[in-house]
Image: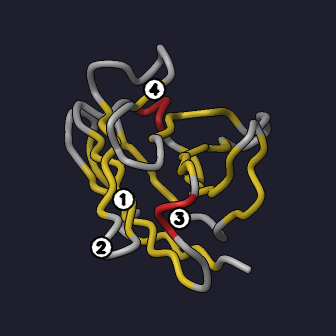
Amino acid sequence: QVQLVESGGGLVQAGGSLRLSCAASGGTFSGYVMGWFRQAPGKEREFVGSIMRSGGFTSVADSVKGRFTISRDNAKSTVLLQMNSLKPEDTAVYYCAAGGAGKWAYWGQGTQVTVSS
């Protein structure tokens, strides 16, 4: 059983930056693909990005490409989401997930990101 805890959310002005962190425990962190998702009020949860087990390959959604970067530190069992040039439409609860083989098996509780215009 893997536990995921997100941190780093908050209120920021448009154009600003935030860095989200997700700390994992209870499993072999390097064995999981890690992902970030977000859910805005009244909307479906959407994929933000993912990073492979070794950290050698990342993928991000078109809506955040060029602004958000994902990285991981397997020694610290941590995955980061660096968010730059934030827009009001990035306002959402951001979730960390762990999985593999096309499935997201574990989820964190989420951290709120609010971008003011």
Mark nearer the viewer, 2 or 4: 2
Separation of residues labelled 3 and 4 (CA atoms): 19 Å
- Residue holding disc 4: 60
- Residue holding disc 3: 111
For image coordinates 39% across by 44% down, the residue present is 115
Of residues 93 and 6, the one drawn nearer to the viewer in this rendering: 6
Separation of residues labelled 1 and 2 (CA atoms): 18 Å
For image coordinates 60% across by 78% down, the residue present is 27
Q: Are marks 3 and 1 in contact (CB under 8 Å)?
A: yes
The quarter of the picture where the N terminus appears is bottom right
Is residue 15 left or right of 69 when viewed as pictured? Answer: left
Q: Residues within 10 Å of mark 3 (few under 14, many from 20)?
A: many
Is residue 98 left or right of 11 when viewed as pictured? Answer: right
> How is colour applied across the structure in the image?
secondary structure
**Upstream in sequence: badge 2 or badge 3:** 2
Separation of residues labelled 4 and 1 (CA atoms): 15 Å
Separation of residues labelled 2 and 4 (CA atoms): 23 Å
**Upstream in sequence: badge 2 or badge 4:** 4
Residue 46 falls in image quadrant: top right
* Amino acid at pointer 3: Thr
Residue 70 pos. (x, y %): 34, 42
Separation of residues labelled 2 and 3 (CA atoms): 23 Å
Of residues 54 and 37, the one drawn nearer to the viewer in this rendering: 54
Of residues 75 and 94, the one drawn nearer to the viewer in this rendering: 75
Q: Residues within 10 Å of mark 4 (few under 14, many from 20)?
A: some
Secondary structure type for disc 1? strand
